[in-house]
Image: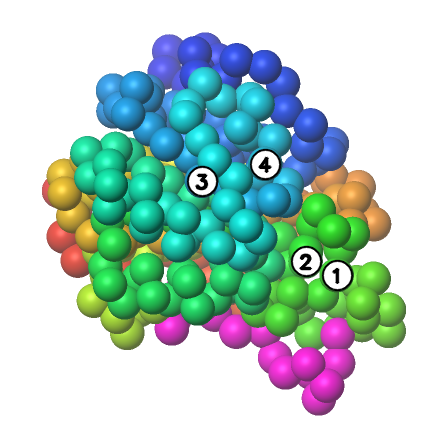
Amino acid sequence: MAGMKKPESIVQTAGYCGGCGHGIIQRLIAESVEELGIAEKTIAVVDIACAYWSLDALNFDGIAGPHGRCASVATGIKKVRPDANVYVHAGDGCSYVIGLAETCFAAARDIPITMIVVNNGIFGMTGGQLCLATTLEGDWTVSSVKGRNVEDTGKPFDVLQMLKSMDIEFAARGAVYDAKHIRELKKYIKKGFENQRDKKGFSIIEVLSPCPTNWKMTPVQAMEKIKDETEKIFPTGVFVDRGGAK
């Protein structure tokens, strides 16, 4: 049965914390790439952060770009290797804060890459600091120990709603808190790779993902938080599909 066997592209375990969503996302990437038969021409671009572990775990060519510059690095690779399947696997701090300009300009230029952005509401690898784009109002982080105060930091903002105004190929948001949402997320990720295979434009898939370690929660509590709180601020679904359903 499809999905029951470990993808061949996963060649060793990764160092993600227990309950982290990155491992689920990594598997969905591997399954999608193998099902499309494009593993040999896949190039991963990861941030110097949690997704870095996937360079060891996945048998793809890959590179870690400077912090926050994944979209620019992926753009450069796609320009010199136009037939490659180039994707970004990075966090919200990288893609929506430090690298917001790079993400927006890759979208504005409709670069035919696939960005997978992990929204876990914090800067994960550096200790769990507040992420201006995604930390929810009132949430505790190591840099908002009394909870996020929007009078000081502004409110979280929906980057996909911003990108929606640009002429891009595909934008969607999924989640990993239950099997139904994981199945839906895989469709989005696979669609992003199909768009690239078919010489279409910029695709971005955001993923609502838990970080039990930095949220100071159990894995179960972290998944419940996504369902009960995060998804209300960042709704899942398709935001842009220029090509439409097949």
Three-letter amino acid code at the position of disc 4: Tyr
Task: Check disc 3 and report the residue beneath it.
Answer: 45
Specify whether 47 is left or right of 151: left
Three-letter amino acid code at the position of disc 2: Ile
For numbered disc 4, what is the local secondary structure?
A: helix
Q: Residue at image x 27%, y 67%? A: 108
Is residue 131 visible from the viewing direction of this image? yes
In front: mark 2 or mark 4?
4
At label 4, counting other C-alpha atoms closer than 10 Å, the crowd grade (few under 14, some 14-19, many 20 or more) is many
Say if the magenta span includes residue 9: no
Task: Check disc 4 and report the residue beneath it.
Answer: 52
Q: Label 2 vs label 4: CA separation?
A: 16 Å
Say if the magenta span includes residue 158: yes
Task: Check disc 2 and report the residue beneath it.
Answer: 122
In front: mark 1 or mark 4?
4
Where is 6 relative to 20, above or below? above
Do residues under tags 2 and 1 come within 8 Å of each other at their CB atoms? yes
Mark 4 or mark 3: which comes first in sequence?
A: 3
Point out the stretch of residues depicted in magenta.
148-162
Three-letter amino acid code at the position of disc 3: Val
